[in-house]
Image (spheres, grey):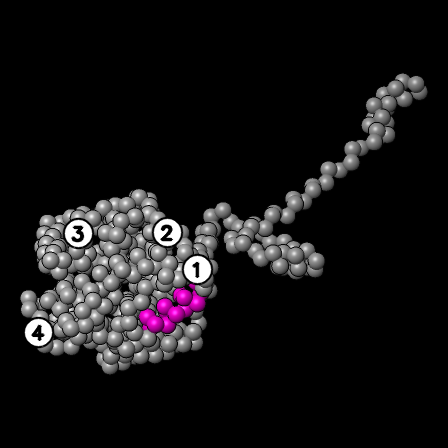
């Protein structure tokens, strides 16, 4: 009996030993959802608050062999324009362009710039230019207030006496621009300050200086450390005391005043207004096809507006040195003035010049030192000195 129990012990122990628990297969965690575009923050918050939405539904992972969905690229933060906005833009462009064409046809005229004989087109009438200059000058005086020095101030007296020399020289030289002799005609406005009996010549010269007839020359000096001067249309000259501090001699001040008066003689303000009107018409037209106003503004500024401004400054330098010589000041001082201005403002690089309204001082100096320009100016200077010697005798 004991032998039988001994033989059954292994079998009984196998039946009585506890079997290990069956291994259950744990299901894999859901694969993180892959986004092929940046989900909005608002949608993700709503999904967390409301279970059962699309964002929490288990979706099978994408197949590794499936083509990737391209991400949308946005090159601008501006939304695309609707068809209605495009139509409005077309209407605005049409109105601006038609209006500009009408103004150009009705008021536009070709004129010749004195000294340089350059032909330019302007749409601003002589009377309109005078009103513009008068308004600008009055606004400046109102803003400056007590900073405008009294006419009896020594600086005002000095600057006015130099300005009279430049304005008188403009009258004499422009009156003899085409002919050496003065012919019968209307009184030259620029020469009225010195000799009202001088007459302007007939023909082309008279047409060149016709816009000077209504000029009411006025000079004020402003107590300001800014090294600058300006001449508004109509002969309204403003000089800052900072300029007088940097340039001590009358010849240097005369060189600056000659440059500013040259802007008025050449009608640069009217030409600038004309050019800006055309640039605005071009800008409005381009906005129909290119919805990038900032880009268009920069392109028109660097390719059209600034190069035109630098061209006007160079022309004013040329006319200014002729006025300087005609007034009896040595024209060789003019290049030195622009060298000094370059030191005051800092020597600009080529990139800075490209982004500036004025050319660099080095270029301006080189153009004035050109043999043709300087020889012509020295001839006027010799004539002016001889005239003064005759008057003194």
Image quadrant where residue 102 sits? bottom left
Going from the N terminus, do you reach mark 1 or mark 3 first?
1
Q: Secondary structure at mark 1?
A: helix
Q: Nearer the viewer, residue 128 or 322?
A: 322
Going from the N terminus, do you reach mark 4 or mark 2 first?
4
The residue that mark 4 highlights is 183
The residue that mark 1 highlights is 147
Circle 4/circle 2 CB separation < 8 Å: no
Quadrant of the frame with the C terminus: bottom left
Q: Is residue 86 left or right of residue 186?
A: right
Which stretch did the figure color magenta? 132-144
The residue that mark 3 highlights is 331
The residue that mark 2 highlights is 242
In the image as oriented, which residue stretches furthest toward the top? Answer: 3
Whole-percent x, y for residue 14 in the image: 82, 27
Q: Is residue 134 visible?
A: yes
339 is within the stretch colored magenta: no
């Amino acid at each position: 009996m004991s032998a039988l129990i001994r033989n059954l012990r292994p079998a009984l122990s196998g039946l009585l030993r506890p079997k290990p628990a069956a291994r259950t297969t744990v299901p894999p965690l859901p694969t993180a959802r892959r986004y092929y575009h940046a989900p909005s923050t608002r949608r993700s918050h709503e999904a967390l608050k409301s279970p059962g939405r699309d964002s929490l539904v288990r979706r099978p992972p994408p197949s590794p062999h499936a083509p990737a969905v391209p991400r949308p690229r946005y090159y601008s933060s501006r939304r695309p324009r609707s068809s209605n906005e495009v139509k409005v833009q077309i209407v605005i462009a049409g109105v601006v362009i038609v209006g500009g064409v009408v103004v150009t046809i009705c008021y536009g005229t070709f004129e010749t710039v004195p000294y340089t004989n350059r032909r330019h087109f302007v749409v601003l009438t002589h009377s309109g230019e005078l009103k513009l200059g008068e308004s600008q000058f009055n606004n400046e005086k109102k803003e400056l207030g007590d900073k405008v020095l009294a006419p009896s101030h020594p600086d005002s007296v000095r600057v006015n006496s130099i300005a009279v020399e430049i304005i008188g020289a403009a009258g004499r030289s422009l009156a003899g621009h085409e002919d050496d002799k003065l012919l019968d005609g209307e009184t030259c406005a620029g020469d009225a300050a010195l000799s009202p009996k001088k007459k302007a010549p007939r023909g082309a010269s008279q047409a060149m200086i016709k816009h000077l007839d209504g000029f009411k020359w006025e000079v004020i000096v402003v107590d300001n450390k800014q090294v600058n001067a300006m001449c508004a249309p109509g002969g309204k000259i403003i000089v800052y005391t900072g300029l007088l501090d940097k340039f001590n001699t009358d010849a240097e001040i005369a060189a600056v005043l000659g440059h500013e008066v040259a802007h008025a003689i050449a009608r640069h303000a009217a030409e600038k207004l004309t050019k800006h009107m055309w640039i605005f018409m071009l800008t409005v037209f381009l906005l129909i096809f290119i919805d990038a106003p900032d880009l268009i503004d920069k392109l028109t500024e660097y390719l059209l507006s600034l190069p035109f401004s630098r061209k006007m400054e160079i022309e004013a330098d040329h006319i200014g040195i002729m006025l300087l010589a005609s007034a009896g000041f040595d024209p060789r001082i003019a290049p030195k003035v622009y060298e000094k201005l370059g030191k005051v403002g800092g020597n600009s690089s080529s990139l800075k010049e490209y982004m500036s309204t004025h050319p660099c001082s080095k270029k301006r100096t080189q153009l004035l030192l050109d043999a043709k320009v300087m020889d012509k100016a020295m001839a006027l200077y010799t004539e002016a000195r001889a005239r003064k010697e005759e008057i003194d005798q």
